[in-house]
Image (cartoon, rainbow, N blue to C red):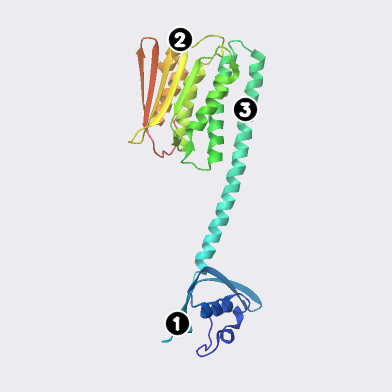
Amino acid sequence: GIDRKLKGKPAREALPEVAGQGFFELLDEVYETGEIHKGDAVPFTTDSDEEQHTYYRNFIYKPLFDDEGKCSGIFVEAVDVTKQVEIRKRLEKSNEEKQILLSELHHRVKNNLALIIGLIELEMEEYQQSFHSIPLQTTRNRIFTIAEIHEVLFKQQSLKDIPFHNFLDRLRDILFNSNGKNGHPDIEINCDQLKLNINQAVSLGLMLNEILSRLTNGNGTQPCKAIKLSLNIDDKNKVITKLDIQQLDEEIKEKLIQPDQYLPATLIEVLTQQLEATLNHTKDINRDIFKIQFKKEHKKGGSSSL
């Protein structure tokens, strides 16, 4: 603090250390215009023991008027906010460092996943269209699903608001359009502008990948005729996912609904439990309908049960 007698002295004489920092000029302006001036976290510097210190003040300059309406003086009130400003700056620096770390982590994860996918695809080339390439393709698609959700997550920069509809469009392009339309079933997607947190997005993304990847024409057969996929959220914050599949191959259907016999169905069951969802399968003449329902919320823990 300043330990000196200030009463009765002109401002420039009382506080010479703040000269050249604009404060006296503001006082002159308020005196001439008669208008209030407010400052928030305004810095000013002082020299002490050959060191320069910066402080921050919230202040108000309020003109005082005499009976004739002329400005006769200025009321000054100031509050020291130096500690608050320093804390805020430290937080901003910390957030910036965390953002840099997150960006670096993203690129490392992305590169590692791309490397794994590349190695699997090299292995697939050796088998080409043989039966042995199918498990490799399935594994590649699972890794791809995690990589794509991670990519959407980084672009969004939020763990709570991943635009799942963007991921679905990408998943459809990869699974059904990567090799053209040769023999692939028609697929129609109707999805609300749906945003999910990272844990629900990964679980639902893996579940849909597990189903849809079985319905492509990867092994030369026709697994189904057409697919309709819809995702909606109702007024009770419940996400409703519906897969309407026409003329689903019976062997493939068994792999999706028999968890005690087949790995795909086991994974679907585990992912359903992660989402705390209900999964119903019904049959209607030549159509199989899978309906997944769960409450949209922030769930912690992710894939620990896998």
Give x and y (percent) for residue 65: 44, 83
Q: Is residue 270 above or below residue 66?
A: above
Gap in angstroms between the C-alphas marked 3 and 2 = 31 Å
Q: Name the residue located 41 percent from the left edge and 31 percent from the top edge.
A: 274
Closest to the camera, between mark 1 and mark 2, is 1
**Is there any visible trace of residue 303 in the rendered image?**
no
Q: Which mark is residue 116?
A: 3
Tell me the crowding category of disc 3: few under 14, some 14 to 19, or many 20 or more residues within 10 angstroms, Cα based: some
- Counting residues from the N terminus, which is met first, the one under dot 3 or under dot 1? 1
Amino acid type indicated by mark 3: Ile
Amino acid type indicated by mark 2: Asp
Q: Name the residue located 56 percent from the left edge and 71 percent from the top edge.
A: 55
Give x and y (percent) for residue 3: 53, 85
Closest to the camera, between mark 3 and mark 2, is 2
The quarter holding residue 130 reads: top right
98 and 154: which is toward the camera = 154
Q: Which residue is mark 1?
A: 64
Amino acid type indicated by mark 1: Leu
- Counting residues from the N terminus, which is met first, the one under dot 3 or under dot 2? 3
**Is there any visible trace of residue 294 in the rendered image?**
yes
Q: Residue furthest bottom?
A: 8
Gap in angstroms between the C-alphas marked 1 and 2 = 88 Å
Q: Residue furthest left?
A: 236
**Of helix, strand and loop, which one carries label 3?**
helix
Tell me the crowding category of disc 2: few under 14, some 14 to 19, or many 20 or more residues within 10 angstroms, Cα based: some
The quarter holding residue 301 reads: top left
Q: Which residue is mark 2?
A: 249
The quarter holding residue 121 reads: top right
Give x and y (percent) for residue 185: 51, 14
- Counting residues from the N terminus, which is met first, the one under dot 1 or under dot 2? 1
